[in-house]
Image (cartoon, coloured by chain):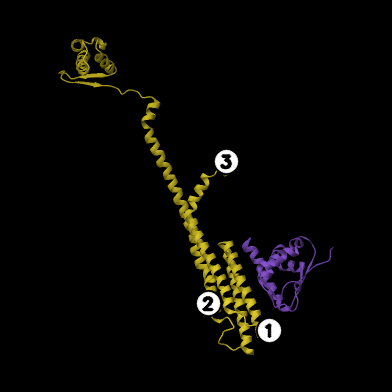
Amino acid sequence: MNGEAVANAVAASAAAMDKKVSASSPAPDAKQSSETAAKSSVPNGQPAVSTGQSVVNQLIADCVVHTDAARTSTLLLCPSKEQGYVDKLLVSSPTLIMSGMALLLSIAAFRYNSRKDARARLQSIHDDFWLRKVLSPQTVEPLLKQLGELGSTLPPRPAVTYGGPEQTAALELVTQHIDKIKALSVSFASMAVVDKTLAKECVEALERIEDRLTVHKFQLDQHFAGNVPSPNVTEAWTAIMEEQTKVLTAVQHYQNNVLSQSRTGIVSRMLARMRTRPGGQPR
Amino acid sequence: MDAPKVIDFSKFNGPVYTGRERGVRLRAELNLDAADTSANVVDVVIPDGTYTVTSSFFLGLFGPSVVSAGSKDRFYQRYRFVAPSFLRPEMDGYVARALQEKNLFA
């Protein structure tokens, strides 16, 4: 190995570099400096006079020089400069931040999907199974059928002449309708298994239907006794239809709530958490 | 022990007793919540000329008392009814319904 020769060769390159620098900003002794650097030797790796030479010597101080036997090529093996902890962190921080964000997003997506599935399952149980398959066939459907019959049979009918047997039959018919409404009230009360408010609203609406039919029956009885004019069927029917609409609206409202809860429940909970202080106290 | 409290339906607008709100209002007027907490018996007189007492009225008036009593027998021990015979099975059904709703809506 001929370190001196290598240094000379590198110094020549450095001198050339100096020359280029001088050409861009000429100095009075630029030519002399370049020549000196080119000709100077570097005994024992000591820095030469020129600036380029000293820089090169500093650079190659830690390097190992390999030269082939024919001295036609030289290989410099230089160790990379040791980086501090902060330098390493600065270099790798964007990667770390991106990785952290990806991890957080993955966790959030997993939790979102889990809760969405749980909500969908709950909605499926409450709405699809309980309401549609179990409760509705025992409550809403019979009520619609019952009130449909009531609308077409509620006495007094205009075309009927009410003698003794017809009067008894008419009163009995209203009593049967009242009894069916009472039985339906018990069925509607079982809606409490899915929603207590829904059950209460429906039961109270059916109570009002029962009340209206009871008053109608009393008026009809009084009419047959000759005390009062015939009760107004249209008026009674309108009041009953209003209560039927309340029942259907309550059921529809419940179903909409179940759907909207399953859609917005997660977002609402997240917003509620954001509005809550770390101590658990709402803002 | 105080004299039994008497609820006479003939003092109210009859002979058809309907409406939960009406029953609830009457309950407040008669202060039955206080009566339920005392050991005194309440006599309920329903006149013979009564056409009907609907479930809504009965439950508005006596529903919380039935729930408070906890059972049909205890309710009838506290509230002694003098009523037309055709109303007895009706009222039994109302009491049973109040107890059912207590469990369902609790």
Q: Colour of chain A?
A: yellow
- Look at chain B in the picture and name its colour: purple
Q: Earlier in the sequence, mark 1 or mark 3?
A: 1
Between the residue at mark 1 and the residue at mark 3, the CA separation in whole angstroms equals 72 Å
Task: Give the quarter of the image for residue A48.
Answer: top left
Give the answer, above or below, for where A80 lies relative to A268. above
The residue indicated by pointer 1 is A227
Q: Position of residue B15 (x, y in %)?
A: 71, 76
* Residue B87 seen by the camera: yes
Task: Say what amino acid the circle numbered 1 marks.
Answer: Asn
Residue furthest to the front in view is: A229
Q: Identify whether B81 is placed above or below A14.
A: below
Viewer-nearest residue: B36 or A112 = B36
Q: Secondary structure at mark 1?
A: loop
Q: Residue at x 52, y 46 (%)?
A: A273
Work out whether disc 2 and disc 3 sit on a shared chain. Answer: yes
User: Quick check: marks 1 and 2 in contact, CB under 8 Å?
Assistant: no
Q: Report the side of A232 relative to A73 (left or right).
A: right
- Mark 1 or 3: in front is 1
Label of residue A279 in the image: 3
Mark 2 nearby-residue class (10 Å; few <14, some 14–19, many ≥20): few
Marks 2 and 3, how far apart at CA: 57 Å
